[in-house]
Amino acid sequence: MTAVPTRDHPATVPTAVLRARAKSLRRHMLRMASRLGEGYIGQGLAIADVLAALYFSELRYDPRDPEWPDRDRFVLSTGHYSIALWAALAEAGVIPEAELDSYGADGSRLPMSTLDTTPGVEVTGGSLGHGLGVGLGMALGLRLAGRAARIFVELSDGELQEGATWEAAMAASHFRLDHVVALNDCNGIQADGRVVLDMEPVAAKWRAFGWDTVEVDGNDVEAVGDALRRSRERNGRPKAIVLRTLPGKGVATLERREKAHFMRVEPDEWAQFHRELEGVDG
Amino acid sequence: MASPGVSQSMAATEAVADRPTVQAPFGTALRALGHVRADIVGLTADLAKYTDVLPFAEAFPARFFNVGMAEQNMIAMAAGLAKTGLVPYCTTYGVFATRRAYDFVAIACAHSRLKVRIFAGLPGLTTSYGGTHQAIEDLALMRAVPGLTVIDPCDATEMTQLVPAIVDVDGPVYVRLVRGTVPVVLDPARYRFEVGKARRLREGRDVGLVSTGFMTDRALQAAERLAAQGIDAAVLHASTLKPFDAEAVVELAGSVTRLVTIENHVVSGGLGTAVAETLVDHRVRQPLTRLGLPDQWLECGSVASLQDKYGLTVDRLTEAIRGLI
């Protein structure tokens, strides 16, 4: 598949193409996790459709020049979702695909949690509750500079429990940062298992903080693409897209597995996972 | 008399008659810097009036952001602004910049080597409000963060000089704020602030006083009184706690018979510890006494009486040093 990202929004991308991108991202992730035998594969597979729609139909960037000043920024606040970001950056041509084999290895540019020294990584994620606030600062700075760039901040449902997230949510409305889009991945799990502190109703919380909010099936790449396109509206309000995602999505065994924050997988299971992803059986 | 951008209450230093003062040296210097550097932005967390930043805010309203009572978000936003190439100068109180926003200072700013500048009001024992507002351990916390520069300036001269001097320093910088009506202790014509450099302000053979922040003003006054009693004290002003000017301390240690550190901070983790580390690392055998605040939560009360109780006044310093010799 040839890389198509450009400095402009592509004309409407056929859903079939985005689905193929999402499957390709999942392949990359299985490749990385199977070499290591463990990882945040559940979260990564869950968010593959979101990253496919984002990187291949919405984000304006230049894979040959990741520091292009007018680029849209994607802030991955959950640094441990790095496996998904490495897949997207490789698929987009920002980093070489062969480098994915170094995921989690000593000295790799592709660690288990993100570092902003890797090309294409805007923020060192992982201290949860940081991403939204840092994204707002970027949005203010770019607006002061007169640049048209937008800021997309991924954050998780567990991360809504961090108070700093809501400090940032208040500030985004106050400063009318309508070029900020929160991509709130609600996969229902956190470190101790299923979400331990009920965060519902999530969309109503964003709305109450002044955000222009929609809720979509985060594993429906067409719905995500539509929501991203609608988020371009400059109406004075920051945008929130609440994404309902399924951990392990695309690999039936993992979808059914007791939901785990961090998965270890037996060596003989990977071939089965690959078959399930490709729809060969299962 | 109140004037815009100047807080009159709880001035950092006790008044000394006939000494020149400067109103809001921080905000005034930041406004001057803002005129020559378009990349300077200001932030505060609902403490603009109390951190002397109004001169900048009023001159550059489009480049100033008051984020409300949300110090974590202020530092996170400052990191984001810095990521776009701007140089944010943030103000709050030391207790909030450290205890409240520590993870954001450490990870969002220092780990990413971003040029965020944090000016922290009410350093050490400079407010009557007690432990909630007295940043008695901020230097210890901030010194521990890799890649963070830590400065405790003495007076209006040093504050005025350091605001532009730190603009291009790599990584974040934490500065203790001397605010309001700030005395001129250091001669602007002779003193030159430089990040990481301690300055010998007085020569002496008996005891070497190493001081930081406005305690240098008091160390100089104590040295005068000690001279009248036949004790010859040198004064080394170490305004940068990190990176620390070990060379200057070693040099001083070689020219006196004992060292005393003087700081407006608990005696663990700040200047006294930096000097002790220096002596050990450089195998310098020299008696060292650390003067500063005790390892305990301090009381509420008037600043003058508390500073006397906890040993920060010139009288108490002079007594303590004389008692050593």
Image (spheres, coloured by chain):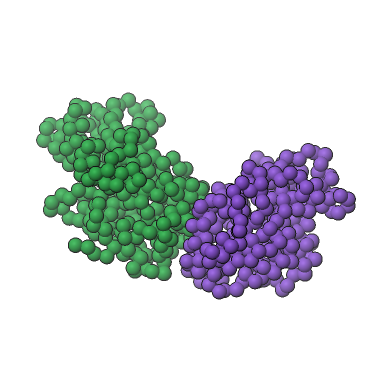
Chain colours: A purple, B green
> As drawn, which residue projects farthest toward the left?
B228
Q: Is residue B279 above or below residue A220?
A: above
Q: Residue at x 49, y 62 (%)?
A: A170
Q: State whether residue B152 appears in this view.
A: no
Q: Nearer the viewer, residue A161 or B92?
A: A161
Give the left or right position of residue A146, taking residue B190 as reference.
right
Percent x, y of residue B103: 49, 47
As drawn, is B177 to the left or to the right of B187? right
Q: Where residue A7 sits in the image (x, y, percent)?
A: 65, 69
User: Is any part of residue B106 visible from this angle?
Assistant: yes
Q: Residue at x 78, y 38 (%)?
A: A266
Q: Number of labelled discs? A: 0
Whether A31 is drawn above or below A64: the answer is above
Q: Quadrant of residue B224?
A: top left
Q: Residue furthest right?
A: A281
Which quadrant does the N terminus of chain A fall into?
A: bottom right
Relative to B164, say whether B274 is above or below: above
Q: Is residue B135 left or right of residue A21?
A: left
Residue A199: x percent and y percent?
Answer: 59, 54
**In this view, A253 is above or below B297:** below
Q: In x, y percent, where is residue B31? A: 33, 64
At horizontal 61% and vertical 71% (from top left) the residue drawn is A232
